Image: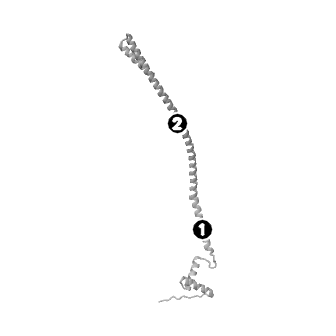
Amino acid sequence: MERKIEKNRSVKFSLQVDQKLDNLARKLGRTKRMVVMQMIDYFYGTKKDPIDINDHALRNQLSQGINRILSFIKQQEKDLLLPSFNLSSEVLKLLQVQFSESIHHNQAIHALTILVKDMNRTLDSLNRQLDSEKIKKSVLITNAVQLVDSFLKERDALGWSLNSVKKNELYKKLIADIHKL
């Protein structure tokens, strides 16, 4: 079996740094060597500078992400919210116009209702007068027919000599003329 021979390198650092590295390795449950190798891989892979305590690269990256999110939200607002708001304001204006028109229609309907009621009262009055006149006419016709009947009876009693068929024709014509009144 071939054994790979690793060439170890050593780095010298102070006792305080060694204690910090030891505490960190214990917390992570790894060896010091493993922690150092992982730190190197991390800094190499993320291209972060270990001197930068505030991690400006991360802050810049987060800032760019936030800016992208904000620009997306603004674009969505332009694309979705503003047209919806404009549409709802137009609908509100149309409803206001329709409401004012309905008020005018209601006023016109109210005026027409009053006019129709007045016309109905006038028609009722005219119907009553017409009924009264029909009754008067009926009474007049009845009286005229009675007058003609009495005239004919008296004429017959006096003995005017007209033939009976002509008398009946004259009587029927007279009654018809009276009913035309």
Crowdedness near tag 2: few (<14), some (14–19) or many (≥20) residues, C-alpha within 10 Å: few
The answer to whether mark 2 and mark 1 are in CB contact below 8 A is no
Circle 1 sits in a helix, a strand or a loop, which is it? helix
Other residues around mark 1 within 10 Å, as few (<14) / some (14–19) / many (≥20): few
| Type of the residue with mark 1 | Ile
Q: Is residue 41 above or below residue 139?
A: below
| Extreme-left residue of the structure | 164
Residue 130, position as x, y percentages in the image: 48, 28
Q: Is residue 138 above or below residue 115?
A: above
Q: Residue at x 57, y 61 (%)?
A: 76
Residue visible at 56% across and 49% down in the picture:
95
Report which residue position mark 1 lands on: 66
Question: Nearer the N terminus, badge 2 or badge 1?
Answer: 1
Most foreground residue, 172 or 19: 172
SS for callout 2 = helix
Front label number (2 vs 1):
2
**Label number found at residue 126:** none
Front residue of 134/172: it is 134
- The residue that label 2 is drawn on is 117
Label 2 to label 1, Cα distance in Å? 72 Å
Asked if residue 71 lies left or right of residue 167, the reply is right
Q: Quadrant of the C terminus?
A: top left
- Residue 152 is situated, as x and y percent measured from the top left of the image, at 40, 15
Q: Does residue 164 appear in the picture of this structure?
A: yes
Rendered location of residue 71, percent (x, y)? 60, 64
Q: Residue at x 35, y 13 (%)?
A: 164
Instruction: Give amino acid for label 2.
Output: Lys
